[in-house]
Image (cartoon, helix red, strand yellow):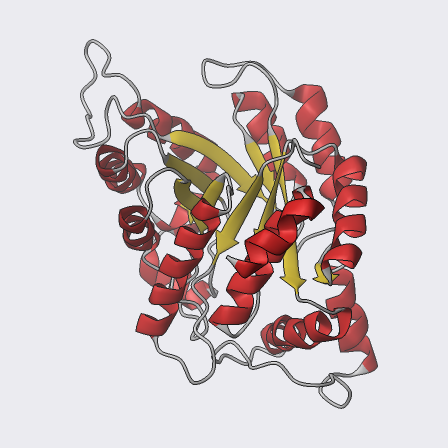
Amino acid sequence: MASIPFSVLDLSPIGEGQSVSDALEASRRMAVTAESLGYQRFWLAEHHGMPGIASAATAVVIGHVGAATKTIRIGSGGVMLPNHSPMVIAEQFGTLAALFPGRVDLGLGRAPGTDMRTAQALRRNLDAGAENFPRDVQELQLLLGPVREGQGLIAVPGANSDVSVWLLGSSLYSAHLAAALGLPYAFASHFAPDQLFEAISIYRDRFQPSETLAEPYMIVGVMAALADTDQEAQRLFTSAQQQFINLRRNVRGAFPKPVETMDGLWSEMECFGVEHTLQHAVVGSPATAREKVARFLKDTGADELIISTPIHDIEARLHSLKLFAGLKDPVRQSALVDA
């Protein structure tokens, strides 16, 4: 575990009783803390029309956390490319690369990251956007790369930038495409566990070396809620469990506060469904978490682990981030927590 980089995926959650400004300030604090603890990268995810998520203008929020940090890689996990033209994203991330050279990742997804009505408002020809995803990825790579002789369309900023392009996915489609294009790949196992191991196999077996990447490189994701005791971690994680119930019921609201028990808040079938979806979540004390993370990394053979921390209170979220960083070095953990 000590040799595997840890990274952070943030959604800028807007908790009950909190504002968008509170959420964005929490993301800044998370990025600063992640950098101080040696996390590899800090990614933000694009979602729209969700009262509990403040990272809709993803490139803007990346600039916000980039200005507060110095060394940690920053980027998107991901930008939902069917919502945008490749030219716009090339300009946005070319600008970020100019502001924060050598630090910017561009993770690309194919899902809309919202409901269909909002997706149509973002980009009217949504079906064509999804169907054209492979072509749009390659166009975006061209716009971010060196200007070639006779190239008629040039992104400024964007051209000749050092943006690292990734593919993200929760299905086998992205595994095939990432392998074919020779791109690094991140699988959303933190909320889509069912096809994880098949996606790993497809990506590694079919990977084609490219100018970008000589060998396959894969990130896997988990949700993580760590606390000093298993009981407290389970209480904190009830916020995520409530959020997933609300998503299934199509109830939109702020990110819920934790509760002492989920009894009476979900049906037996809802409990089964949420626990299945979140089966890879790491919830508990450091001792409990260490065992599960070690097993998960061994089973997946992942090159990197990215964690999402669905905890309502920012102080508890920062504490969880410190505890998770300490999983690599138990001797150093107490020093991290006390810092």
Q: Is residue 12 above or below residue 6?
A: below
* Picture residue at 79% right of the left edge, 58% below the top: 288
Q: Residue at x 76, y 74 (%)?
A: 231
Q: Quadrant of residue 294?
A: top right
Q: Nearer the viewer, residue 113 or 282?
A: 282
Q: Is residue 73 left or right of residue 183?
A: left
Report the label total.
Answer: 0
Q: Position of 30 compared to 98: left or right?
A: right
In depth, the one of 65 and 248 nearer the eye is 65
Vertical placement of 67 versus 175: above or below?
below
- Residue 214 pos. (x, y %): 55, 14
- Judge whether 131 appears above or below 213 on screen: below
Q: Nearer the viewer, residue 290 or 220?
A: 290
Q: Residue at x 26, y 37 (%)?
A: 87
Q: Estimate the x, y position of residue 150 in percent, counting from the top left.
A: 19, 11
Q: Residue at x 43, y 73 (%)?
A: 14
| Frontmost residue, 334 versus 209 | 334
| Left or right of 232 in this view: 74 | left
Q: Is residue 210 above or below residue 183?
A: above
**Residue 45 visible, this angle:** no
Q: Quadrant of the N terminus?
A: top right
Q: Which residue is outermost to the bottom?
A: 264
